[in-house]
Image (cartoon, rainbow, N blue to C red):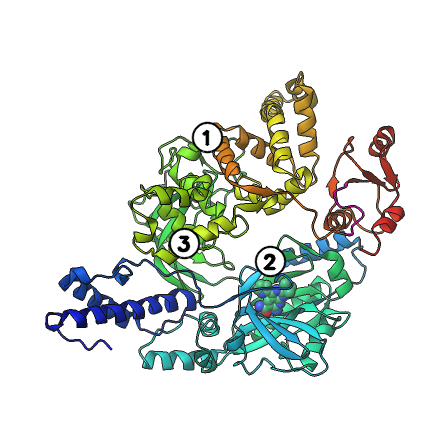
Amino acid sequence: MTEARNVGDLSEEAAAAELAALAEILLRANQDYHADDAPQLSDAEYDRLKRRNAEIEAAFPHLKRADSPSDRVGAAPSEGFSKVSHAQRMLSLGNAFDAEEITDFDGRIRKYLGLGPNAPLRYTAEPKIDGLSLSLRYEGGKLVQAATRGDGSVGENVTANARTIDDIPQTLTGAPDLLEVRGEVYMSHADFAALNARQAEAGAKTFANPRNAAAGSLRQLDPAITRARPLRFFAYAWGALSEPLAETQKGAIDRLAALGFKTNPLTALCDGPDEMLAHYARIEQQRASLGYDIDGVVYKVDDLALQHRLGFRATTPRWAIAHKFPAELAWTRIEAIDIQVGRTGALSPVARLAPVTVGGVVVSNATLHNEDYIAGRDSNGNAIRGGKDIRVGDWVQVYRAGDVIPKVADVDLSKRPDDAQPYRFPETCPECGSAAIREEGDAVRRCSGGLICPAQAVEKLKHFVSRGAFDIEGLGAKQVEMFYHDDQLPVRTPADIFTLEARDAKNLTKLANRDGWGETSARNLFAAIEERRRVPLRRLIFALGIRHVGEVAAADLARHYGSWTALAKAVDLAGPAATRQLQADRAVARERQAAAQEGRRARIKPVRDAVWEGLDSAALAAWTDLTGIDGIGATVAVALVTSFQQPAERESIDALVAELTITDAAAPATADSPVAGKTVVFTGTLEKMTRAEAKARAEALGAKVSGSVSAKTDIVIAGPGAGSKAKKAADLGVQILDEDAWLALIDGT
Ligand code: D41
């Protein structure tokens, strides 16, 4: 459309029309680029159009549009596809990198199931395809929906695109009435090379690797484009089902193959870690000749009844793991070492590298972990990399392990510049100038500035809006960063997010008139924020970003206290006890040191007891209750309580809570559970299952599992050998059940 007529020759109408057309094309291009990984315009063409737009605007300043592409930064979040809730969460996979981690994996499973080292336990082993996962829903044998994984709960509806993939059957005969098939969409090496050749010829963007090409092709808004891209599909799992497929993983995969799905021919059954590792070696040998990318081997417990018993933790099944291939390595030079300040104040050194390609991806940063790591020591003072330190100017070998940040494997001392200086780790925060303190026994140096440190405040906000936390649509890391530095409409604490709309209403420079924002995007943002004003307790706790309080601990706390009021009250009460705990830890460390110097045995108990003496009983009770929650140790408890004690932090939390409606921790999916909301304690030996399994099952039924008996305990399950806890329960008149009676109580659930 844009015949390159001289701007000076344009009439006003022609200029306005061209600006309108350019706005539309460039908006579309932005969206293609950011949302679809596969722009339709070459970079050069995009730049040319953007320049043309700027030239016309310069010649006709009064014609500049409110939605001018010149003002636009990035694109709106991908709005092209509708969202799909997965009927069953799409889990992710834990990673392992060496043989030892595989024997550990087997050991954990045996322990959880209470199986001895020689009890038979079978696994499947299959290549891990490097593509993107897709869930296909069949109803009455017809494909009705295809969705990307997304965040595991909500993905994108790509049904029209999936229908163009030959490996995906449109209809099935003899399938369960409801069947969700999960697998990997990928592109073969040959098809990838041919696609890139076509793209290059057409002047369009080429893809860095087959995975990106597959992703870009599947997430095309126009299915005709997807159809022209040679995508393939391997089935490896399932979601919701109206009837079981088989009794084993292998049986289920064979059944999917019989229904017409492609399944990976290198899937094998293995009896234990030795056979798993042997199959891993076989797959690794064939890797180069497979014709498609794989990045490891996935092992899964074969018996589906055992898979069910094992269940999952947070987002990964206990019964499966990905054994990744060793990462590719590359040599490059360190140009600088920067310090990043994280949400908990940790100073993290990052190496800025001369860009280098590692495994198909350009790498320009690598983590350097902490000051000991840079100096060539581990946290115990032992030499790593043969004691070689890392300096600016050094040649280093970097690798990518999984999807994580690249790491440094080695340093080439023979190439070290003569004037290279040992790296001096800063002792003040580079962001706010506060002292950066390294506590004894901690590998990490931390900024002591708390919320006055802008870096900590911004990182805390980014965490606050992240997926497992408030997950506010349209308010990601980038926007948070922008709002933090905005002088007219600042967001410096979580509470500020929830007052944004009200403040905007009073403000003359409305958000809707700012760069990159329009009426609609501002309205959408306010609506998305309103949607999150009601928040489940566990999300709120996690969102606070307290050190050591991850999603699992947050859920444990929410389940135990049930409401924000109860949690806050308990944490406040426990305040003096946490102080004592810190003092006790220090006193014990001093005593250990003194004893070592004097060559005597450390006397820990009297030292510790002396610190706790005279603590008021309410504080002690609250502390015992808090640290009695299974999964909440002293470290988590201290971090939680001390964060509530910091005035700035506390003010920020209180202001936030005042803005919210906190929905109490409802027991999960337990309407008909006889133990929902009850506090139970397991003690003594369990014979039908392990402690970990008993705990996981009780929690799945909505019970709180505690480690200690108190007046609040509802049921004690006492096995043989139960001692003081059973006695205390009897004294308190708490119901005591043996294992069989407990199983009978929860049976059929
Ligand atoms: O080939 C794969 N990429 C692959 C991925 C596979 N063969 N099996 C998988 N199994 C699972 C579970 C055990 C959770 C059903 C997976 C994935 N998950 C997976 N891929 C990406 C996220 C999860």
* Residue position for label 3: 523
* Lower position in the chain sequence, tag 3 or tag 2: 2
Q: Quadrant of the N terminus?
A: bottom left
Q: Looking at this view, is 27 or 95 the one in front?
A: 27
Give the Cα separation between the discs numbered 1 and 2: 41 Å
Amino acid type of disc 1?
Answer: Ala
Give the Cα separation between the discs numbered 3 and 1: 31 Å
Mark 3: few/some/many CA within 10 Å (<14, 14-19, 20+): some
Give the Cα separation between the discs numbered 3 and 2: 45 Å
Residue 215 to residue 622: above or below: below
Say whether marks 1 and 2 touch (CB < 8 Å). Answer: no
Q: Quadrant of the C terminus?
A: bottom right
Amino acid type of disc 3?
Answer: Arg
Dominant SS of magenta comes to: loop
From the image, state whether disc 3 or disc 2 is nearer to you.
3
Residue 490 in the figure: left or right of residue 326: left
Q: Quadrant of ligand 1?
A: bottom right
| Residue 648 numbered mark, or none | 1
Say whether marks 3 and 2 touch (CB < 8 Å). Answer: no
Residue 594's x, y, as percent?
A: 59, 21
Amino acid type of disc 2?
Answer: Ala
* Residue position for label 2: 96
Residue 95's x, y, as percent?
A: 59, 58
Residue 74's x, y, as percent?
A: 35, 59
Q: Looking at this view, is 168 or 28 the one in front?
A: 28
* Lower position in the chain sequence, tag 3 or tag 1: 3
Q: Secondary structure at mark 3?
A: helix
* Lower position in the chain sequence, tag 1 or tag 2: 2
Which quadrant would residue 29 be assigned to in this image?
bottom left
Mark 3 close to ligand 1, CB under 8 Å:
no
Question: Magenta region: which residues?
Answer: 672-678
Q: What is the tally of numbered marks visible in this picture?
A: 3
